[in-house]
Image (cartoon, rainbow, N blue to C red):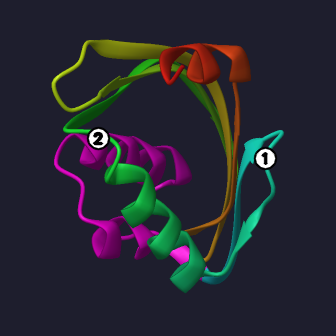
Amino acid sequence: MTRSADELVTDFCGRWTSPDPRELAGFFTEDAVFQNIPLPAVQGRAAIEEYIRDFLGNFEHLEFRVHRQVSMGDLVMNERTDVMRRPGGADIELPVMGVFEIADGRIAAWRDYFDMATITNAFS
């Protein structure tokens, strides 16, 4: 039995607490696009895996706390707080709005919208 787009995104977001870059990249289509708005987009599963690996290197723990999630067909949107712990540091709590487009049981596009100042201030 195939899972719904909603179930796929719920599973994907839950796996960030024990992240494996290859496993997370496996949720994407080969030609998927990921973008943290307003940063440049990342194109393709291999590039997304590399991006995830590099991103995870900045943190000792990461959690996606999904507060609300809605779906309509192959479109899923969630409101969440991404909690990121820097090595030896405090948690960074980032409010995020995520948009996921699903094709053939995989993520074809993922866009996250957030206030860049929150990240900039946490790393300054």
Which numbered tag is attached to residue 116?
none
Magenta-drawn stretch contains 22? yes
Q: In which quadrant of the rendered image does the C terminus lie?
A: top right
2 on left or right of 121: left
Of the pair 124 and 18, the residue shown nearer to us: 124
Figure quadrant of the N terminus: bottom left
Which quadrant holds residue 65?
top left
Q: Which mark is residue 14?
A: 2
Q: Which residues are magenta?
A: 1-29
Up the image or down, 15 lies above or below 54; here it is above
> As drawn, is 31 to the left or to the right of 10?
right
Judged from the image, the secondary structure of the residue bearing numbered disc 1 is loop
Name the one closer to the observer, 3 or 67: 67
Kindly identify the residue that appears in the image at 50 percent across and 44 percent down: 6
Q: Distance between the Cα atoms at labels 2 and 1?
A: 24 Å
Closer mark to the observer between disc 2 and disc 1: 1
Q: Provide the residue designation for mark 1.
A: 39
Q: Residue at x 55, y 70 (%)?
A: 48
Per the image, label 2 sits on a secondary structure element best described as helix
Circle 2 residues within 10 Å: few <14, some 14–19, many ≥20: some
What is the magenta segment's predominant secondary structure? helix
Q: Was residue 48 drawn as part of the magenta stretch in this picture?
A: no
